Amino acid sequence: MFSDIQLSREEAEQRLRWTFGIDHFYDDQWDCINRLLHGERVLLIQRTGYGKSLCYQFPAVVMDGVTIVFSPLIALMRDQIASLRAKKINAACINSEQTAEENDGILQDAIDGKLKILYIAPERQENDNWRTAIRHIKISMVVVDEAHTISVWGHDFRPAFRRIVDIVNLLPQHTPVLAATATATRRVEQDIQSQVGNISTVLRGNLMRDNFRLRVVLTDSEEEKMLWLADKIKELDGCGLLYVGTRANTDIYSRWLDYLGVSAINYNAGMDAQTRKDIEDGLKNNRWKCIVSTNALGMGIDKADVRFIIHTQVPVSPIHYYQEIGRAGRDGKPTDIVLLYNKAKGNDGIENDKKMPLSFINNGRPPKQQYERVISLLKEEPLGERQLIMKTDIKQTPMRVILADLQEQKIIKQVQYDSKSKRWEYQYGAPQLDTRAFEQLRQAKLRDFDSMMDYVYTTEPRMKFLCDFLGDDFHPNLHNCDNTGLAKWRVPDDMELQNKLQDFFNNLFPELDVETKSSNLVNGVAASFYGITAVGNAIHRSKYENGGDFPDFLLKLTLKAFRKKFGRMHFDCVAYVPPTRSGNLVRNFATKVAQSLRIPISHDIIKVRQTDEQKSFETTYNKRDNVKDAFAVQRQGAFSGKQVLLIDDIFDSGATIKEIGKLLTKDGATLIAPLVIARTIGGDKI
């Protein structure tokens, strides 16, 4: 659609007051809007909280047709749609949290011209109904929000975003396009320009945040990070976010804060949609002092007064860090930004806090042999995504990266086999796999991480450092960090806090979420997290270093976890998971548990076929297959009418526990409660 709307700034601001209740545009906002009204393609790089959304919402209202907004942020969609509808602007979104019927109805409204703005998550472009509908929607403008995700050089590249480019390239030349982001280096800026094509203007704003109080606190252990939090968090104004590296750590740190009397809750992408929404709403309403989260929380949350952001895990680049801290202090008031960094070195000589980001970077693209394995399988026959995952034991996320890369290199293509299934086919005569770009990207990300480490140890103004990295040349003299006058914050040397932390660890009993409709399993408990305390080392010595039976301190800790979780329950017998390679370790441990609790022990669960160690598999599918039908009850009916306490050493995916739960349920057990020594930190998400 050709767009060339003649509207003076005075006329536009009059309409702005009527529709949005805002008196004036910023000069840069009007510059962007005016260019879009005249059919230009614009890249807008402005800090979080600047008002980028108004730059497309206002022209969307003025233009004739539907503005399509691609955004990865479901929380942002919800907030903006509610705000737009309150202003009598018809807006809706297509996303995975809605039913197929709801999404189809919204698409029909867009086709019928009943909407002004339609938000859609990029991954939804795979939906056939969307592909059909887009050909019949009268598009007035396309917006790519979080546009850095188009670029492979960006900090959150998502393959689905690249498909947006295909739609943009099909638009008539003078259809306005806005690509917007708060974080883009010069290299990312250039890549977005080449991806979107025909961008006539780049509007780059001042990224400096002079209301931030930036600090780095160096520690010698994870425990010292927790001690620092105990000492300082109650002094911080308002409410804020604590970012951690893993889902398990969201649980650990939120429990620690609760233990200290600080209102806190954990949040991660593994939670169901309604729970996440409830926590997001609670954040806006200051329901807690602190939300402990992976970096899944924050993007798109409409809250201007987040008063502090603390990281316990160093991000992989300054651009990641700027994006995440940019969610705070959008009201311009003083805001504390703290990075806790564990500088202690492991046996390999590498600082401990470097290991997770380095692993993330080095494994950002799957190994070349995994690409070759997928190509080899598809040469034999067309396969769907799930079939490929099961045959290759590659997790879902890296599998989708592989498929997107192979499709882009025209080595494979996706075809519709019937109304319900799609498969990937090898293209005979296809070019050879080219992984040179992957290695270039890995090296670039390693350089970015080196810059992040420079930030940790820099002696120059920290805000200046971040702005320089992002290509923002405007930064006057800054005095808002621990290198320019703010007090240095350090870990307290407080024996009382250390004793409190030890007591916390001695009572940290992770939940095992195993309840299913297909069995009488109830959620269980672990005595500890594997790797958090000495528990993991002790288990490893016994299993893999001929260290003998699990030591007595593990028995005492496990019994303590039992009493806290199941102390008031009656059990008829103790059973245990038969070993894969650890001999009688679990049997001997279960016997000691049974003796301590004075509950009869059963040896009736047996293994009927050999299995591999679960840790040797990557995906849930294959872990399930590894133990499927691998166990039996030696004496049929041995568990009939009984409540069973089921013992194992390590809990990871839960596949083994669930398989035995179904077996014992079939044998007549009325309740099966798992009790294990340790739960792994990561688990196996696919």
Image (tube, helix red, strand yellow):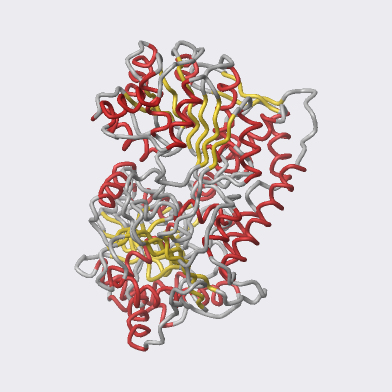
Question: Is residue 469 in view from this perspective?
Answer: yes
Question: Is residue 585 in view from this perspective?
Answer: no
Position of residue 447 relative to residue 592, above or below, is: above
**Count of numbered marks:** 0
Residue 273 falls in which quadrant of the image? top left
- Tell which of 209 and 380 is nearer to you: 209
Residue 30 falls in which quadrant of the image? top left
Position of residue 449 relative to residue 182, above or below, is: below
Horizontal arrangement in the rendering, residue 196 relative to residue 232 (left or right): right
Query: Which residue is pictured at 31% across the width and 31% down the height?
Result: 81
Position of residue 465 relative to residue 507, above or below, is: above
Q: Position of residue 571 (x, y in %)?
A: 25, 65
- Tell which of 509 and 412 is nearer to you: 412
Looking at the image, the residue that sits furthest to the left is 568
Q: Position of residue 11 (x, y in %)?
A: 35, 22
- Tell which of 225 and 367 is nearer to you: 225
Q: Position of residue 156 (x, y in %)?
A: 55, 45
Position of residue 267 relative to residue 597, above or below, is: above
Query: Which residue is pictured at 36% across the width and 28% down the height?
Result: 93
Q: Position of residue 364 (x, y in %)?
A: 63, 49
Query: Which residue is pictured at 66% across the width and 44% down the height?
Result: 187
